[in-house]
Image: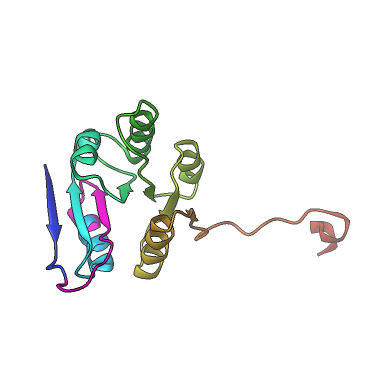
Amino acid sequence: MHSVKSLSPRVGRVKVVARILIVSDAKHVRDEVRSVLADGDTVFIDVERGNQIATVAREYKPSIAVVDMQIASMGGIAVCMAMRLEESGGRLPHIPVLLLLDRRPDVFLARRARAEGWLLKPLDAIRIRRAVSALLAGERFEDDTYEPDPVLVGENNSAADQ
């Protein structure tokens, strides 16, 4: 099932309206993303099943897709890869993808799937806004939250010196 939700548009001003596709089978994830980004002009398209993505994207032509990593019918990585496959076949325009990852090691998979950005859960409003703004501006967003500290190895930094 998918639905389109929008707040009342402002009258008398010309503004580019962002159309954000939110793909998650978890209502609380869709609600959290929507509540952070709702500004009266943004249109939200909710999709609960990953296998509906191509049909819905063709119909609604979203500006970006925010895709949860865990979707019962088709995971976020598979959704992103399917979108890239549809794009390469000329069946979809390029739609930037922001993946919502569960674990830091999933970053490797997000890169391989050619996602333009990712956030690690738990989510927060500031990072969601930064990531979506970057993707809407045609930029990438790589969340460095929970990134491990680098380990320095060398003559002066060995464990024996400590």
Q: Position of residue 108 (x, y in %)?
A: 51, 41
Quadrant location of residue 78?
top left
Q: Is residue 66 visible?
A: yes
- Is 160 displayed left or right of 116 in the figure? right
Q: Quadrant of the C terminus?
A: bottom right
**Looking at the magenta stretch, what is its main secondary structure?**
loop
User: Considering only vertical position in the picture, is 125 above or below 81?
Assistant: below
**Residue displayed at 31% across by 47% down:** 67
Asked if the stretch drawn in magenta spans residue 15, the answer is yes
User: Considering only vertical position in the picture, is 116 above or below 7?
Assistant: above
Q: Position of residue 34 (x, y in %)?
A: 23, 62
Q: Name the residue at the top extreme.
A: 89
- Is 35 displayed left or right of 8 in the figure? right
Asked if the stretch drawn in magenta spans residue 145, the answer is no
Q: Which residues are magenta?
A: 10-29
Q: Nearer the viewer, residue 98 or 102?
A: 98
- Is 73 displayed left or right of 118 in the figure? left
Q: Quadrant of the N terminus?
A: top left
Q: Is residue 72 visible?
A: no
Q: Position of residue 66 (x, y in %)?
A: 31, 51
Quadrant location of residue 53?
top left
Tally the numbered discs: 0
**Residue displayed at 85% across by 62% down:** 161
**Residue displayed at 20% across by 56% down:** 44
Give the image's coloring scheme.
rainbow
Quadrant location of residue 147?
bottom right
Q: Position of residue 22 (x, y in %)?
A: 25, 51
